[in-house]
Image (cartoon, rainbow, N blue to C red):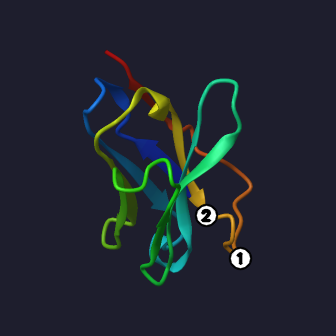
């Protein structure tokens, strides 16, 4: 059964850090171009960072230099290290294949809430 479970969110002060995890089952995460997305209240879901099967990465300009995407093939888990968090990073974060991936999933996980506030 294909499943994605996001975790690691929480409430953090501006300038703080969080590590998000995306545990995948039913497929090898290393074989796909994967990505982290986020959706703030009342806004569309946006692409935050991509990690390609080749190991290449790409980041949205708004998080470049602050966020780091990575994966642990043995754990079949993808991560998003978020540093120097800003209030505008507040959103629900999701993982899913990258928009350019040839493999599409017809579902989204439950996401993990990140709230940056003093």
Q: In this view of the protein, can residue 2 be seen by the observer?
A: no
Question: In this view, which residue lies farthest toward the right?
Answer: 106
Q: Residue at x 38, y 34 (%)?
A: 9
The quadrant of the rendering that contains the N terminus is: bottom right
Question: In this view, which residue lies farthest toward the top?
Answer: 118
- Residue at the spot of label 2: 97
Distance CA(mark 1)–CA(mark 2): 9 Å
Chain-order first, disc 1 or disc 2 = 2
Q: Residues within 10 Å of mark 2 (few under 14, many from 20)?
A: many
The quadrant of the rendering that contains the C terminus is: top left
Q: Residue at x 63, y 24 (%)?
A: 41
- Is residue 112 placed above or below 13 in the rendered structure? below
Question: In this view, which residue lies farthest toward the bottom?
Answer: 54
**SS of the residue under disc 1:** loop
Q: Is residue 29 left or right of residue 47?
A: left
Label at residue 102: 1
């Amino acid at each position: 059964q294909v499943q994605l479970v996001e975790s690691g969110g929480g409430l953090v002060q501006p300038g703080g850090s969080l590590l998000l995890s995306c545990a995948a089952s039913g497929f090898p995460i290393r074989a796909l171009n994967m990505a982290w997305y986020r959706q703030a209240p009342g806004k569309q879901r946006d692409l935050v960072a991509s990690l390609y099967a080749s190991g290449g990465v790409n980041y949205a300009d708004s998080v470049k230099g602050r966020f780091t995407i990575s994966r642990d093939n043995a754990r079949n888990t993808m991560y998003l290290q978020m540093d120097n968090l800003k209030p505008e990073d507040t959103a629900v974060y999701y993982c899913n294949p990258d928009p350019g991936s040839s493999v599409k999933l017809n579902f989204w996980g439950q996401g993990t809430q990140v709230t940056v506030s003093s």
